[in-house]
Amino acid sequence: MESSAIFRLSSPPPSFLTTKPNNTKTLSQTPWKHRTSLPTQVHCNKMFVPGFGEASPEAKAAKNLHQFFTYVAVKIVAAQLQSYNPEAYKDLMDFLDKHSLDDGDKFCADLMRESSEHKSLALRILEVRSAYCKNDFEWDNLKRVAVEMVNESNTKVMRDYVQETSH
Amino acid sequence: MESSAIFRLSSPPPSFLTTKPNNTKTLSQTPWKHRTSLPTQVHCNKMFVPGFGEASPEAKAAKNLHQFFTYVAVKIVAAQLQSYNPEAYKDLMDFLDKHSLDDGDKFCADLMRESSEHKSLALRILEVRSAYCKNDFEWDNLKRVAVEMVNESNTKVMRDYVQETSH
């Protein structure tokens, strides 16, 4: 309400505050105070998801996946080393015992600073998590499994309730 | 080994067990017992990911997403109720205070058994999480953001290390 009062004082309104009309000439001839204001309607069929601040739900989920990819990369590198480089495997395992993988980036940063041998391990983990995320991880499969999981869980929750209450 | 012994008795081998040769005529003229057996090689360029037991990394990631979808569904339903049904909103908030959302399915099952009002809330959460997962969640965006995140994090980890050691 306050902003519309300000606009009434200055005619025409600032261009960045108005939606671009289809017929500029006709509208510019009409005085501002006589214009019937058309609310800008955003047509979106999606449900409103509150409370994610600046990050989208997708970004939040991606952040979780990011940690997961580091965990997978460490597992892949460890399995590769185990067979042909037992020393490096032992180094990695010892480091894993002392450092948490909850923050994957911190883990890699710390590993990089441990020694020159550890540094090459860290670089390999970074490389593997990038390759895994881009090429190996089956994104289509993830969607399929997740949708199936939701369907099955919904059915199970409802079936259990019905079975429990119908006896 | 047992199966190859069986094949030796009956010549030619069953068609569904042989790979289709490029030149059928030439191979069919060769007797089965003289054929040098070619081992079936599975060509897979993907890295071996150990230690996920029966579940694939995709299934593990989907399980995490499943919990996330329940969390998002509860947030969506709460936001919808807040504006037009304050009583149901209060019921949901009170229930949330007392019950953990760590296990989404258990949360829904418990909510369903609280009262008939709570039951309709639970059914709505189940419906919303299914619709959100199938229609609203932007799967392509998830992949894009996750790949970007890995790229940026890798660059950051390496840049920080270089900056720290070059001074």
Image (cartoon, coloured by chain):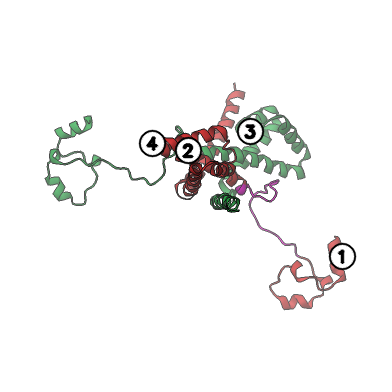
Chain colours: A red, B green
Q: Which residue is mark 3?
A: B102
Q: Bin the neighbour count of mark 4 within 10 Å (Cα to Cα): few under 14, some 14-19, many 20 and up.
A: few
The structure residue drawn at horizontal position 59% and vertical position 48%, both measured from the top left corner, is B137
Residue A18 location, x and y as percent? 75, 68
The structure residue drawn at horizontal position 78% and vertical position 66%, both measured from the top left corner, is A37
In the figure, residue B96 lies in which quadrant?
A: top right
- Dot 2: chain letter: A
Q: Which residue is mark 1?
A: A5
Q: Nearer the viewer, mark 2 or mark 3?
A: 2
Q: Bin the neighbour count of mark 2 within 10 Å (Cα to Cα): few under 14, some 14-19, many 20 and up.
A: some
What's the magenta region?
A38-59
The structure residue drawn at horizontal position 42% and vertical position 43%, both measured from the top left corner, is B47
What's under tag 3, amino acid-wise? Asp
Q: Nearer the viewer, mark 1 or mark 2?
A: 2
Which of the two discs, 4 and 2, labels the residue nearer the N terminus? 2
Q: Quadrant of the N terminus of chain B?
A: top left
- Dot 1: chain letter: A
Q: Which residue is mark 4?
A: A83
State the separation of the CA atoms marked 4 and 1.
76 Å
State the separation of the CA atoms marked 1 and 2.
63 Å
Is B8 magenta? The answer is no
